[in-house]
């Protein structure tokens, strides 16, 4: 039997009976952080992000560092940049499981499996 046939059978069986796949476990927080970072980076490459002022006005939560950028007199072009790219919470979230970050509004805090 070829490898591809065995793979097809395995995945069909797995899809037919999901309870045989084992207990569900949450994805590692490091993986969730990396995926989030990649998604925001792609979104920023496609065009400017929504400014922090507009995000907050629309009901979005900002972390303490985003809030500092929002209230600083920097203008919308700077507010539309991805502040997380230079934040230490991103670095910790992508490299450490259960990273010691606790700022309200930080997406990397929400990803931690605590």
Image (cartoon, rainbow, N blue to C red):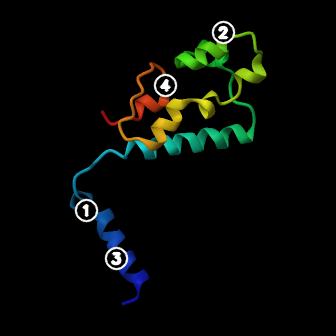
Give residue 71's mark: 2
Q: CA distance from mark 2 to mark 1?
A: 52 Å
Q: CA distance from mark 3 to mark 4?
A: 42 Å
The tag earlier along the polypeptide, 3 or 2, is 3
Q: Residues within 10 Å of mark 4 (few under 14, many from 20)?
A: some
Up-down relation of residue 87 to residue 76 (above or below): below
Q: Quadrant of the N terminus?
A: bottom left
Q: Which residue is mark 4?
A: 106
The tag earlier along the polypeptide, 3 or 1, is 3
Secondary element under disc 4, as helix, strand or loop, is: loop
Q: CA distance from mark 3 to mark 2?
A: 57 Å
Left or right placement of residue 44 versus residue 13 in this view: right
- Report x, y in % for residue 112: 37, 35
Q: Quadrant of the C terminus?
A: top left
- Report x, y in % for residue 40: 61, 38
Q: Which residue is mark 3?
A: 9
Q: CA distance from mark 3 to mark 1?
A: 12 Å
Q: Which residue is mark 1?
A: 17
Q: Which picture quadrant has residue 38?
A: top right
- Report x, y in % for residue 90: 52, 35
Q: Which picture quadrant has residue 67?
A: top right
- Report x, y in % for residue 57: 61, 12
Secondary element under disc 3, as helix, strand or loop, is: helix
Question: Which residue is at a point 47% across and 36% down the rendered structure image?
Answer: 92
Question: Which residue is at a point 52% across and 19% down the rendered structure image?
Answer: 63
């Amino acid at each position: 039997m070829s490898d591809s046939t065995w793979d097809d059978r395995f995945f069909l069986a797995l899809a037919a009976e999901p309870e045989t796949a084992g207990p569900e476990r949450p994805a590692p927080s490091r993986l969730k952080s990396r995926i989030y970072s990649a998604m925001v980076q792609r979104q920023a490459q496609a065009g400017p992000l929504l400014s922090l002022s507009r995000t907050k006005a629309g009901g979005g939560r900002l972390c303490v560092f985003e809030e500092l950028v929002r209230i600083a007199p920097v203008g919308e072009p700077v507010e539309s940049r991805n502040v997380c790219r230079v934040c230490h919470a991103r670095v910790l979230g992508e490299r450490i499981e259960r990273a010691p970050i606790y700022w309200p509004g930080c997406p990397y805090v929400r990803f931690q499996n605590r």
